Image (spheres, coloured by chain):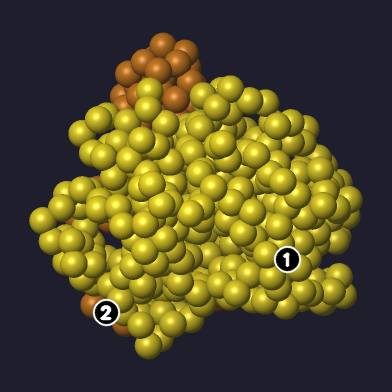
Amino acid sequence: MEIARHWRLKQQRYGLVGEVCPHCDYKIFPPRDICPNCGNEARTQYTFSGKGEIFSYTTIYEAPTGYDSNAPYTVAIVKLTEGPMITAQLTDLGEQPVEIGMPVEMVTRKIRNDGDERGVIVYGYKFRPVMGA
Amino acid sequence: MKEIVISGIGQTAAGEQWEISLRDLAYQAIKQALDDSGGLKPQALFVGNMLSLNLSNQAHLGGLLADYAGLTGIEAVTLEAAGASGGAALRQGYLAIASGLVDTALVVGVEKFTDKIGTDVEAALASGMDSDYEAMQGLTPVAQAAFLMQRYIYEYKVPADGFAGFALTAHANGAGNKFAMYQKAIKPETYARAEKVCDPLNLFDAAPLADGAAALILTRRDLIPQKYSHPLISIAGMGSSTDTLALHDRQDLLSFQAAKIATTQALKRAGISPEQIDLFEYHDAFSIYAALSLEAAGFAKRGLGWQLAADGSIGLKGKIPCATMGGLKARGFTGGASGIYQAIEAALQLRGSAGRNQVENPQHALIQSLGGPASTAVSFVLKKTS
Ligand SMILES: [Zn+2]
C-alpha cells in the first residue's frame, strides 16, 4: 500500500518542488539535503516551472505490475529549463512523433493503478508537447 | 600481501530451470566448486543474489545455503548490489582472506527468475532502480538502457546495425559453451529483423533472464593442496565504485564513470595497462552497456565502443576478445550470479580449458560486474600465475 511514502512525495509529484542550493545557486530535483554540485547542505525549497525538453525517450511494451494496463506508453528523460533532468511518462502525444530536443511541459495525470491488490492509485507529473511549439 | 587464488570453480547451466529450487541450484554449483578445489574447507560463505526476496519470498540466503551445502556453522551473509551482487560477493570473499581472518572462502552467486512470471518479474527488476523517481514513473531497466542507446545513437550518429556485432559475437561464442542458455550462432539478418523491445533497442540488444548458480573457492596460495591439478589463477587487482541509481541524476549519461573508476583501480593494483588484457568479460545485459563498458575500460575512445563490435575486434581472435563464453547475452543474465559466471569463464580461459572458445595463451583477464547502468561497478583482473 505504501500510503505514507506516496503522501511524503506529494509536493514533488504534484508541484515539482525541489531545492536551490544557497551556496552555488544550483537547482536540485529530486530534492536531497546535499547539493550534488558543491557538496554543501541545501534545504531551500524551489518550485520548478515544469518546462523542459526531451533528452532521450523510448516506448515500453512490457510494463511492471500496476502499469501494464496503460502499456504501451512512452517515457522520457526531460531536461528541465532550470537545469536538472527528470524521468517521466509523456502524454497527450496524439500523432506527434517524439524526438530529442522537443519542448515539453508538465501536467498532472494518473501514473499507476492499484494493480491486482488494494494498493493506491498514484497521481503525479507527466509531460506533454508544448502546444504551438 | 599474500597472493589470493581461485582454487575451485562450479557452475550450473543457465536458463529456465522450473524444476530446480533456488537452494538446490546453489548447491549444485557449490558442490562442483568444492570438488574442483581438491578438498579445501571454507570458513566463510558470501552469497551474491539480487532478487530472492521479491521473486521467491526468501531472504537470509547465507544461513539457508550454508545449511543446504552441509556447512552449517560457518559465517555466511548475502551481498546485494543489483546485477553487481556477484562481483560484490567475490570482492567480499577476497577481502575476508586478505584481512587474515579467513583462510578459505566460498563465494556463490545464485538467481531464480522463474519463480514468478510477467509483470511481477518486471516489477521486481525495477526495484533495482530509483524507486521513487524512476520505477514510480513506470520505467523498467530495459527502458533505462534504451534511453542510453537512443542518446548514444543521436550523439555519435551510429548506423542502424551499429550494435549488431555485440549480439553476433555473443551468440557465436555461446555456441561453444555447454552452460549457455543459447548455444546457436545468429545471422546479421536475424538481428536486423528482430522485434523492437524498447525502441531503438531490439530483442537481441537485451540479455535473456536466466536461472543459474555459480560458485568459487578462494584461498591463499600457500594453502593450495599438493596434488592440485589446475594452473593457478590469482586475483591480481580489484576495484569497486558507485554512481547514481537514476540516470537523470548524472551529469554525463554516456560515460560509465563507476566502471571507469573500478577498472582503473583494478588495473593499477594489478600493475598493468589495458593493452596487457587478453580478454574482457563485460556486463552485456544490453548491447549499449557493452559499448559503454569498452569505453570505460579504456579499450575505445568515447563514442567509439560500438566500432570494436562492428569491426570484429571483440571476436575470439580479435584485438580484445569479449564475452568469450557467450557473455550475458547468450549465456543468459543470471542476476546476482552474473559476476561469478564471468569470473569462472575468465578462469576457464586462463586455465586453457575453454575448449573451442579458447583465446590464445591468455595471461590476464578483466571482468566488470555491473549493477544497473553501472550504478555499482566491481572490476577484477585475473592472472595466470606460474
Ligand atoms: Zn551547491
Q: Estimate how packed mark 2 is, as few (under 14), some (14 to 19) or many (20 or more) residues with alpha carbons within 10 Å.
A: few
What residue would you read off at disc 1? Answer: B356
Q: Residue B348 at x, y = what percent?
A: 58, 56
Left or right, residue A49 beside residue B158: left
Residue linked to disc 2: A117
| Chain B on-screen colour | yellow
Disc 2 secondary structure class: loop
Instruction: Determine whether, in the image, residue B331 is placed left or right of residue A103.
Output: left
Residue A72 can be seen in this image? no
Which x, y percent locates residue B378?
Answer: 47, 40
Quadrant containing the N terminus of chain B is top left
Badge 2 and badge 1 both on one subunit: no
- Between marks 2 and 1, how big is the CA–CA gap? 51 Å
Q: Residue at x 32, y 31 (%)?
A: B98
Residue occupying image coordinates x 44% and y 58%:
B9
Q: How many marks?
A: 2
Q: Nearer the viewer, mark 2 or mark 1?
A: 1
Q: Please state the chain letter of the residue tagged with numbered disc 1 in the rendered image.
A: B
Name which residue type carries label 2: Glu
Circle 2/circle 1 CB separation < 8 Å: no
Query: Is residue B378 visible in this depiction of the protein?
Result: yes
| Colour-to-chain, orange | A
Q: Residue furthest left?
A: B73
Nearer to me, B158 or B336: B336
Please report, as a chain letter, where disc 2 is located: A
Q: Secondary structure at mark 1?
A: helix
| Relative horizontal placement of residue B50, taking residue B308 as reference (left or right) | left
Q: Residue at x 76, y 68 (%)?
A: B172
Q: Crowding near pointer 1: few (<14 within 10 Å), some, many (20+)?
A: few
